[in-house]
């Protein structure tokens, strides 16, 4: 029985050694990309692929946003005197939100904690300004609607918020 136990222990050590050897040999090999789709086959780097994918995604979002706004306009049955407010509102909502440029980690390492916080607060202030601009345009347009149109707008806005995970019970 002792011999069997020693043999299984020895076999375990051999297998562990072989596994470690295989791991050590693979350390020098470059990682294969996880995505081997058509973009990488065309010689694009993953960074270029993500830029292209991001542009496609932004384009689809813009089309989707324009479609939803057009549907809302139909549901609201706007009068001619509301068209100018609609134009301002839809332009504010169709302008893409500017994403902040990612911070360079090496540059961030050089900053003190208060300087990092200040940099993050500056980025937050820019984003808040964009959001406030959209909210102000929405409130201005809403004020131009009659009570029936406001009900339609409220229903539409409520559905949009639920669609984007902002309804009751959402855990951000």
Image (cartoon, helix red, strand yellow):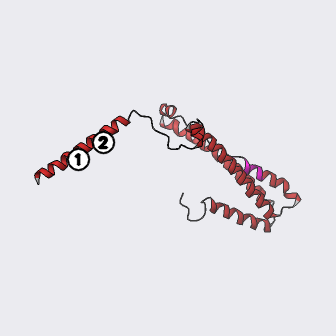
Q: Quadrant of the N terminus?
A: bottom left
**Which class describes the residues within 10 Å of circle 2: few (<14), some (14-19), or many (20+)?**
few
Query: Nearest the camera: 49 or 150?
Result: 49
Which residue is label 2 attached to?
Answer: 19
Identify the residue at horizontal 81%, vertical 65% (top origin): 146
In the image, residue 88 lies at what x, y percent? 79, 51
Q: Secondary structure at mark 2?
A: helix
Disc 1, SS: helix
Observer able to see residue 97: no
Q: Residue at x 62, y 58 (%)?
A: 164
Judge left or right: residue 13 versus residue 23: left
Between discs 2 and 1, the one toward the N terminus: 1
The percent position of residue 37, horizontal first and vertical second, equals 56, 44
- Give the CA separation, mark 2 to mark 1: 10 Å
- Name the one closer to the observer, 60 or 65: 60
On the image, which quarter does residue 67 sit in?
Answer: bottom right
Numbered range of the magenta stretch: 89-98
Main secondary structure type of the part rendered in magenta? helix
Q: Which mark is residue 12?
A: 1
Is 23 left, or right, of 105 in this rendering? left
């Amino acid at each position: 029985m002792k011999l069997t136990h020693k043999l299984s222990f020895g076999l375990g050590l051999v297998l562990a050694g072989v596994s470690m050897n295989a791991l050590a040999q693979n350390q020098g090999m470059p990682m294969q990309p996880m995505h081997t789709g058509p973009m990488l086959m065309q010689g694009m780097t993953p960074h270029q692929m993500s830029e292209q994918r991001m542009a496609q995604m932004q384009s689809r979002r813009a089309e989707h946003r324009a479609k939803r706004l057009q549907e809302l306009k139909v549901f609201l049955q706007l009068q001619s005197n509301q068209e100018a407010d609609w134009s301002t509102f839809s332009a504010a909502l169709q302008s893409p939100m500017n994403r902040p440029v990612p911070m360079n980690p090496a540059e961030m390492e050089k900053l003190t904690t208060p300087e990092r916080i200040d940099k993050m607060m500056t980025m937050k202030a820019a984003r808040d300004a964009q959001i406030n601009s959209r909210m102000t345009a929405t409130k201005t347009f809403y004020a131009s609607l009659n009570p029936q149109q406001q009900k339609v707008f409220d229903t539409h806005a409520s559905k949009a918020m639920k669609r984007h995970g902002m309804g009751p019970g959402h855990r951000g």
